[in-house]
Amino acid sequence: MRIGELAQRAGTTTRALRYYESRGLLPARRGGNGYRAYDEEDLRLLRQIRVLQDFGFELEETRPFVECLQAGHPAGDSCPASLEVYRAKLAELDAMVARLTEVREQVAAQLRQAEAARDALAAADREPRCELARTDDRTIERGEGTR
């Protein structure tokens, strides 16, 4: 099949296919007419790349999976190098989740503090004062309440 058909079947662009080819992830075979020629195995490689990228893998991280398929394995993740990439990605995701959990806890604490301050002012029958800080540490009063 030609590059346009492969791109359509893989759900990508011909530009992306040329880029994958330049990075050595897609074989660069040419037919007798000089056009790029692809087969079902190339489509399989592209689908593996696309799935991994949808999961957040960088293009270079897909290389061990592609090489595993090119070596004749039934699945791109059946080789030790692919498993190592999975482990690294999982550790990266775990770190991201931990960081997001910390940030969420900080935002929740800020929200609780802000709501408590608002409720205290409401109980005292006062409206909050809204102020903006300037870069020279002076403040500009914006008036009473939130308008």
Image (tube, rainbow, N blue to C red):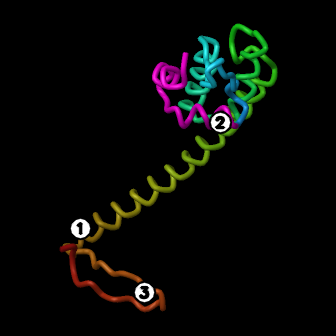
Q: Is residue 99 above or below residue 61?
A: below
- Amino acid at pointer 3: Arg
Q: Is residue 127 left or right of residue 100?
A: left
Counting residues from the start of the chain, the first of labels 3 and 2 encountered is 2
Q: Which residue is mark 2?
A: 59
Judged by depth in the image, the label closer to the viewer, 3 or 2, is 2
Residue 112 numbered tag: none
Residue 134 numbered tag: 3
Count of numbered labels shown in the rendering: 3
Location of residue 97 in the rendering, given as x and y in whole percent from the top left corner? 58, 41
| x 61%, y 43%: residue | 96
Location of residue 7 in the rendering, given as x and y in whole percent from the top left corner? 50, 25
Counting residues from the start of the chain, the first of labels 1 and 2 encountered is 2
Q: Is residue 143 above or below residue 25?
A: below
- Amino acid at pointer 1: Ala
Q: CA distance from mark 3 to mark 1?
A: 30 Å
What range of the chain is rendered magenta?
1-22
In terms of depth relative to the viewer, which is nearer, 19 or 53? 19
Q: Is residue 41 left or right of residue 127?
A: right
Check the image and name the residue furthest to the right.
Answer: 80
Q: Which residue is mark 1?
A: 123
Task: Characterize the local packing of mark 3: few (<14), some (14-19) or many (20 or more) Cα atoms within 10 angstroms.
Answer: few
| x 49%, y 49%: residue | 104
Q: CA distance from mark 1 to mark 2?
A: 57 Å
What SS does tag 1 mark?
A: helix
Location of residue 45 in the rendering, given as x and y in whole percent from the top left corner? 64, 20
Location of residue 94 in the rendering, given as x and y in whole percent from the top left corner? 64, 37
What SS does tag 3 mark?
A: loop
Judged by depth in the image, the label closer to the viewer, 1 or 2, is 2
Task: Characterize the local packing of mark 1: few (<14), some (14-19) or many (20 or more) Cα atoms within 10 angstroms.
Answer: few
